[in-house]
Image: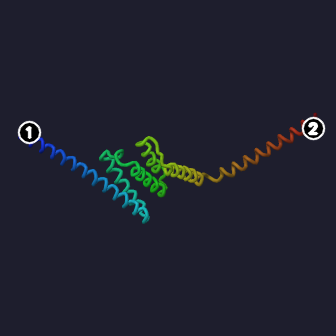
Amino acid sequence: MAKMRRGHAIGKSLAAVVLALVTYVGLQYGTMLRDLDRAASAYSQGDLEGALRLYDGVESRLRAHAAMRLIPAADRQTLFLNQARLLYSLKRYDDAVDRLGREEAISGVATDGRFFLLRGNITYRRARAKWDDAPKDDLQTMNLAANVFQDAVSSCEDRSEEHTSEL
């Protein structure tokens, strides 16, 4: 009889621990979703830095609990994609690519087309910034070189015509 009571007590205690653990995880997940909504709201109001801080806070909490792989892939992708979009808006392209790479590090490959689209936009913006920062003398030099090349080709054609007429 005493063994049965002890077994019941252990069962109830174990059930209480499991229930507390599930409740804790549920509350933490709810807090994470609420913070994601607050960050999205801050982004829509134009507070890019504030939204980025909120997203970074969510990510650091998930990493502290080693729960990054445990949350649904859609929520994780939304987190990384929104962080990358904010960094893209702030013209911090290297950081944005790093955030996009974090999803690939966890799942092995990003299957969401939005990741590829944003990565393409970042690549274009980097190239455009490089082009805008490049000295414009290079363009004039390239045009001059192209003109010299065209003159050389046309003079070669003229010479080949002279040789063929002599034969």
Q: How crowded is mark 2: few (under 14 residues within 10 Å), some or many (20 or more)?
A: few
Secondary structure category for the residue under label 1: helix
Secondary structure category for the residue under label 2: helix
x, y percentage for residue 114?
49, 51
The label shown at residue 22 is none
The label shown at residue 165 is 2
Q: In which quadrant of the rendered image does the N terminus lie?
A: top left
Q: Depth check: 53 or 70 in front?
A: 70
**Residue reaching furthest to the top:** 167
Going by the numbered disc 2, the residue's amino acid type is Ser
At a point 31% along the width and 56% down the height, the residue shown is 30
The label shown at residue 3 is 1
Q: How crowded is mark 1: few (under 14 residues within 10 Å), some or many (20 or more)?
A: few
**Residue reaching furthest to the bottom:** 45
**Residue reaching furthest to the right:** 166
Front: mark 1 or 2: 1
Q: Depth check: 130 or 43 in front?
A: 43
* 12 lies left or right of 115: left
At a point 80% along the width and 42% down the height, the residue shown is 153
x, y percentage for residue 92?
47, 53
Which quadrant of the view contains residue 101?
Answer: top left
* 154 lies left or right of 8: right
N-terminal-most mark, 1 or 2: 1
Query: How many tags in the picture?
Result: 2
Going by the numbered disc 1, the residue's amino acid type is Lys
At a point 90% along the width and 39% down the height, the residue shown is 162
